[in-house]
Image (tube, rainbow, N blue to C red):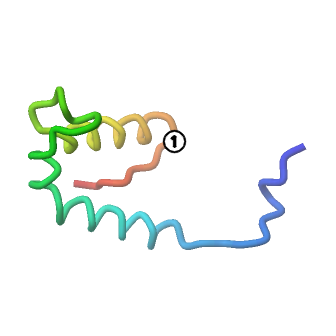
Amino acid sequence: MSNRNNKTYGFNSEEIRSSIERAILINKEKLKECKEWNGWNNEDGLWQEIERTNGVIKEKYDYTIIRE
């Protein structure tokens, strides 16, 4: 049995999404230069991985972190 509807707390997902988006976009150029972790094999470094992850989230959950 799921307790999804019996939340004991709440949060503003739009406010969180906006904060994450703002931080990512502010650091976009640094992310493109970062070739560590998942960005090591991408031309645009971690930025390319963020775009890929955003696409997966959009496809699976119809939600986007970056509306660019």
Residue 37: % across, % down = 28, 37
Q: Residues within 10 Å of mark 1 (few under 14, many from 20)?
A: few
* Quadrant the N terminus occupies: top right
Residue 33: % across, % down = 9, 46
**Image position of 53 (left or right of 6):** left
- Residue identified by numbered label 1: 61
Residue furthest right in the image: 1
Residue furthest front in the image: 36
Secondary structure at badge 1 equals helix
**Image position of 24 (left or right of 62):** left
Q: Residue at x 43, y 34 (%)?
A: 59
**Image position of 67 (left or right of 6):** left
Residue 36: % across, % down = 21, 39
* Quadrant the C terminus occupies: bottom left
Q: Residue at x 35, y 63 (%)?
A: 20
Residue 5: % across, % down = 80, 59
Q: Nearer the viewer, residue 46 or 16?
A: 46
- The amino acid marked with disc number 1 is Tyr
Q: Nearer the viewer, residue 63 or 44?
A: 44
Q: Residue at x 22, y 42 (%)?
A: 46
Q: Nearer the viewer, residue 30 or 19?
A: 30
Q: Total label count?
A: 1
Residue furthest top in the image: 41
Q: Residue at x 9, y 32 (%)?
A: 43
